[in-house]
């Protein structure tokens, strides 16, 4: 009875997830999203210029920034939102691939932080005696570049073959459970995003979106580790999956850290992930990922 309920839930999760994933990855949607980003960026620039000239209605002007660099910040925020949704659809994939997508998001966040510093330099851009914004811009930019390079190394060292031997049924169930988790995260993501948007338009203080979401991902990764232990109970597999979850904690700490420290933590996070992947691939290759049966049981068969 329990297996029957589990299989029905897996079928339901797959039924909902797969069409959404197909639509998100379709070429038509990618073209639409790219066109929308260009339109929003140009519209934001136009709206900011109208605000600077005092041509906006009184009910709109107070909510419109006066720095053109705010349009850059908005564009990068939308790109990050698209990347986060892409991560949610990548969540049912392997631990390593999902973590790689998180590092993509972190690199874009660092790049966005670099552009945010431009707003402190004024228009036209001028450098005063206070070099702090320039320093933060340079560190965030080079940090994003370093993360981008290390991400390439991280992906290059991933094993070409899976070491987790699972039956087709068990693999289907495990992936379907992760699809269910991804669907729940997608609902939370959309709900929280809409709530934050309304609070922003109303001038009400709101929680910073991406740090909140990464905090949620920490608990999600731990949940997936526990679910994975039902399918791969060996010490080696549990340690590797827990290590990838710990890398997410490093990412969350990087988002909460002040400038300069955030880049250091981001680099440490991906170096930890690279080290874990190397140890797993070069040392533990061929190790069993399921606990062997007790000798007494094997002898009795």
Image (cartoon, rainbow, N blue to C red):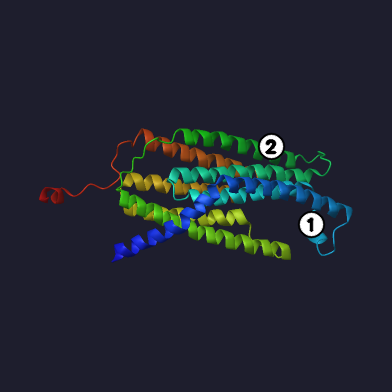
Q: Residue furthest front?
A: 28
The quadrant of the picture occupied by the N terminus is bottom left
Q: Residue at x 30, y 62 (%)?
A: 3
243 lies left or right of 300: right
Disc on res. 254: none
Local secondary structure at mark 1: loop
Which residue carries the number 2 mark?
138
Q: Earlier in the sequence, mark 1 or mark 2?
A: 1
Nearer the viewer's eye, disc 1 or disc 2? 1
Local secondary structure at mark 2: helix
Which picture quadrant has residue 14?
Answer: bottom left
Please tell me which residue lies in front, 168 or 152.
168
Q: Position of residue 196 (x, y in %)?
A: 65, 62
Residue 134 visible somewhere in the drawing: yes
Which residue carries the number 1 mark?
64
Q: Are marks 1 and 2 in contact (CB under 8 Å)?
A: no
Q: Residue at x 41, y 61 (%)?
A: 12
Label 1 CA crowd tier, 10 Å (few <14, some 14–19, many 20+):
some
Q: Residue at x 63, y 43 (%)?
A: 110
Q: Position of residue 190 (x, y in %)?
A: 58, 60
Label 2 CA crowd tier, 10 Å (few <14, some 14–19, many 20+):
some
Q: Position of residue 69 (x, y in %)?
A: 76, 46
């Amino acid at each position: 009875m329990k297996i029957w309920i589990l299989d029905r839930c897996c079928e339901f999760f797959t039924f909902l997830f797969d069409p959404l994933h197909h639509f998100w990855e379709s070429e038509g949607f990618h073209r639409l999203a790219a066109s929308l980003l260009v339109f929003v960026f140009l519209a934001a620039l136009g709206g900011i210029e109208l605000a600077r000239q005092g041509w906006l209605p009184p009910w709109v002007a107070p909510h419109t920034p006066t720095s053109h660099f705010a349009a850059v910040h908005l564009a990068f925020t939308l790109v990050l939102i698209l990347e986060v949704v892409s991560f949610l659809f990548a969540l049912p994939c392997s631990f390593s691939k999902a973590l790689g997508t998180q590092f993509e998001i972190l690199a874009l966040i660092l790049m966005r932080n670099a552009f945010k510093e431009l707003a402190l330099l004024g228009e036209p851009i001028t450098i005063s005696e206070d070099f702090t914004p320039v320093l933060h811009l340079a560190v965030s930019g080079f940090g994003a570049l370093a993360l981008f390079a290390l991400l390439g190394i991280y992906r290059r060292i991933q094993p070409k073959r899976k070491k987790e031997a699972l039956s087709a049924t068990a693999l289907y169930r495990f992936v379907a459970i992760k699809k269910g988790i991804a669907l729940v995260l997608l609902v939370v993501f959309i709900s929280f995003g809409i709530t934050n948007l309304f609070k922003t338009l109303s001038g009400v203080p709101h929680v910073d979106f991406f740090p909140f979401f990464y905090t949620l991902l920490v608990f999600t990764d731990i949940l997936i580790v526990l679910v994975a232990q039902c399918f791969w109970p060996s010490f080696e597999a549990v340690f590797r999956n827990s290590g990838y979850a710990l890398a997410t904690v490093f990412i969350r700490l990087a988002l909460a850290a002040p400038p300069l420290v955030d880049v250091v933590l981001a680099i440490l996070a991906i170096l930890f992930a690279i080290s874990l992947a190397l140890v797993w691939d070069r040392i533990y290759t061929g190790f069993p990922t399921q606990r062997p049966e007790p000798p007494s049981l094997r002898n009795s068969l």
